[in-house]
Amino acid sequence: MKLKILVIESTFSGSGRGVHLIKALRRFGNTIYHLTNVPVSRKPIGNLFDLKIVDQGYFLIEVPNPRKHLPWKGIGMRAVIQLINMLLFFIAIIRNLRVLKQVDIIISRGIHPFTEPPAIFLKKVSNATLYLDVCDPLSEAVDVLTPNRVLIFLMKVVGIMVNKTI
């Protein structure tokens, strides 16, 4: 059975894990829609907020990336940037609602918890199944950042608790 799948994710430097997921889903003949923000290192492909097909054979909706224009310093500014991203995702979903409400599966990949509200909104207005891909690469690889075993243990415990909460 061929499915229509929407992958929602917020990115800053490009979607490595998301693109691998999209390519794998495409191999099974599914129609893939990818809603993301423009990586800070490149210009948008086509017009922002518009649904367009890309070379890899999936549909792309890009929104502006506030991190390109706002400083990524301090937890407060990071939260503001993510809230703006969340609002931009809502706008993109509403602008493309006629097409997106036909999807069968919505995969929300993060940055958590900011991609979940637009995904939940789309689930409420469609018959799609919502899949929350909750992962935290930082807590999975914290041992790369520090040799302190106590800090590694605490970060992993906190990461697990945050992931379960989300």
Image (cartoon, helix red, strand yellow):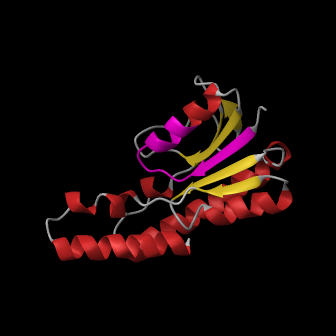
Give the image location of residue 160, x and y in percent. Answer: 43, 71
Q: Is residue 92 left or right of residue 75?
A: right
As drawn, which residue projects farthest toward the left?
147
Q: Residue at x 82, y 63 (%)?
A: 124
Give the image location of residue 35, x and y in percent. Answer: 63, 46
Give the image location of residue 120, x and y in percent. Answer: 72, 63
Q: From what the image shows, is residue 144 above or below residue 158?
A: above
Depth check, front residue: 39 or 129 = 129
Depth check, front residue: 49 or 4 = 4
Number of residue marks: 0
Q: From what the image shows, is residue 133 above or below residue 33?
A: below
Q: Is residue 151 visible?
A: yes
Q: Quadrant of the rendered structure where residue 127 is?
A: bottom right
Q: Quadrant of the C terminus?
A: bottom right
Q: Is residue 62 visible?
A: no
Q: Residue at x 17, y 65 (%)?
A: 146
Q: Quadrant of the N terminus?
A: top right
Residue 12 part of the magenta-drawn span: yes
Q: Is residue 123 left or right of residue 17?
A: right
Q: Quadrant of the rendered structure where residue 54 is?
A: top right
Residue 158 part of the magenta-drawn span: no
Q: Residue at x 70, y 40 (%)?
A: 50
Q: Residue at x 21, y 57 (%)?
A: 144
Q: Is residue 39 left or right of residue 123?
A: left
Depth check, front residue: 11 or 19 = 19
As drawn, which residue projects farthest toward the top?
55
Q: Tell me where the magenta segment starts and ends, as one range.
A: 4-21
Q: Quadrant of the rendered structure where residue 115 is?
A: bottom right
Give the image location of residue 25, x and y in percent. Answer: 62, 34
Q: From what the image shows, is residue 45 above or below residue 119?
A: above
